[in-house]
Amino acid sequence: MHPALSIIFFTTSSGAGFALLILLGIGTPLGLLPASQAFGFAALAIAVLLAASGLASSVLHLGRPERAWRAFSQWRSSWLSREGVFSVFTFLPTAIFGIGWVFFGVTGGLVGLCGILAAALAAATIYCTGMIYASLRPIHQWHNSWVVPNYFGLGVMSGVLVLDLLVRLWVARPWGVALLTFIVTLAAWWMKERYWRFIGATSARSSVASATSLGSRGKVRILETPHTEENFLLKEMGFGVARKHRVRLRRVARLAGFVVPALLTLFALLFGGMIGVVMAALAVASASVGLVAERWLFFAEAKHTVTLYYGAEAV
Amino acid sequence: MTSLPESRPGQKQLGLVIDLDICVGCHACATACKEWNASGHMGPLPDFNPYGDAAWGVWFNRIHSFEEGEGEGARTIHFPKSCLHCEEPACVTVCPTGASYKRAEDGIVLVNESICIGCKLCSWACPYGAREFDADEGVMKKCTLCIDRIYNERLVPEDRQPACVMVCPVNARHFGNLGDPQSEVSEMVAARRGNNLMPELGYKPVNKYLPPRSARMASGQFGAANAVVPSDPASPTDLLLRWVDRLLSR
């Protein structure tokens, strides 16, 4: 599948933003995070900025962005519509939570409840994003049970790395958050590796034979494609990544996305203070690079059944 | 509305039957479709850089060619592919705006161009590549089953068929109600054992493909004798003919 940069930016940025909202919405009412109003402002502003800029980027991907408001109407059947609805709903309790915390210094009571509600809706939003991909039957690399957990895992990892950095500006040695960050990074890495193993070992049941209803006389192979030039289907779904690029990008995703952030988080955990802040900032930067590589591969390694009509032997 | 219409048994499901035994790969159906849709319900279909290098554009009907088998039994099969107007089209349910819909009255799957936002998710959901993005108008387009022909009272009744069906020079394309087991097309599908494409994905395509018939290779299968048998030499006619033959061969 063609990896559109607007969608890569959308899923990574929004994933981090909504995940950060989950962490703040649960952590602050439970007293696990600094109660400082300045911290609340910084953290929520960054979370909302990440989420909203991601959503804005996704609108730019549309052929008719001026009609994007129509995408809220089909939540009964469409995961994309549900994602839109939940993302907007998330901002309502987030606003109350934010105003209560930042302007009134309140983190319990109704404000705290709105925080929890915002966390739940943010989680629902991430779930819907993952389901958009997981519900697509023609794409075997997406239509499996690893995709939604990976969206959660990678989202929470990126969110908690940002949280670790922010908390360190208020607390010299945030043991809880730092430990959580380390564990989540390793867990997200494990899930990604398992996903890669799954797609490397399996392919779709669909074949050229089932796509053409032929095959009783022997192997079916393409003789002539219907056109000599490109078309929308090949541009959008015919994208393939050369093996050496795939190997290189996976290495980048692994190192920058998981290994380096995990090590830096560990150092930050051990040293604390200003060193901790610098380590955490580098971890966020590294993870950003790694996640872009990971998301690019998520698209580039996905094969669509339409390629069976254009010479692919398996998807 | 992107929820699917409630399905009732015996419901009208208009669609095409494509005979892979006959199709010669002439592309007349692709050309007719492109021409008809130069205007009409989904027209115009764009062509980018049409007279230059790397021309490309939106077509609803594309003809692929495959080879099946090896050696003597192998066949070349031409494979026209357009929207299969599935009974359970995921392209309809994934649409966030309701632009993609399946008509309850005849099962035709369409795109409402005025509300489509061009997110392309329907083209990802279609395993057959039936939907293409019109980069000019920013919306998705697909085969309409010539909805602007089949109900068009300005056409004589015999012309109220999809353009691709009318133009096929070898009668490899048929149009009708595949939801009615007694319709001509349904009986054709039953007699020739018509197939669904990618049935494992569960979209329940309405268009059916008739498989190529087995080649009748042995001479006995098409009426000729297996060997030339010499006639009885004692018959008078044969004696006369043999004398004439010898006379003429001198």
Image (tube, coloured by chain):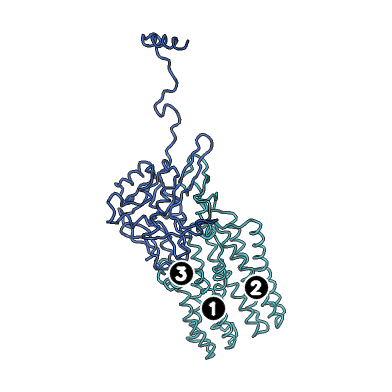
Chain colours: A cyan, B blue
Dot 2 or dot 1, earlier in sequence:
1
User: Which numbered disc flags the more N-terminal residue, 3 or 1?
Assistant: 1
The residue to which callout 1 is attached is A21
Q: Report if the CB atoms under discs 3 and 2 are less than 8 Å apart.
A: no
Chain of the residue that carries numbered disc 1 in the rendered image? A
Q: Is residue B204 visible?
A: no
Q: Position of residue A47 (x, y in %)?
A: 56, 79
Same subunit, tags 3 and 1: yes
Q: Amino acid at mark 2?
A: Phe
Q: Is residue B170 left or right of residue A26?
A: left
Q: Marks 3/1: CA distance?
A: 30 Å
In-front residue for pair A284/A242: A242
Element under disc 3: loop
The quadrant holding residue B237 is top left
Residue at point 70%, 79% (across, down):
A278
Query: Looking at the image, is B129 positioned above or below residue B67?
Result: below
Q: What separation in Å lies between label 2 and label 1 (alpha carbons)?
A: 19 Å
* Residue sitting at x 56%, y 58%: A239
The residue tagged 2 is A182
The chain identifier of the residue carrying mark 3 reads: A
Secondary element type, mark 1: helix
| Residue on which disc 3 sits | A64
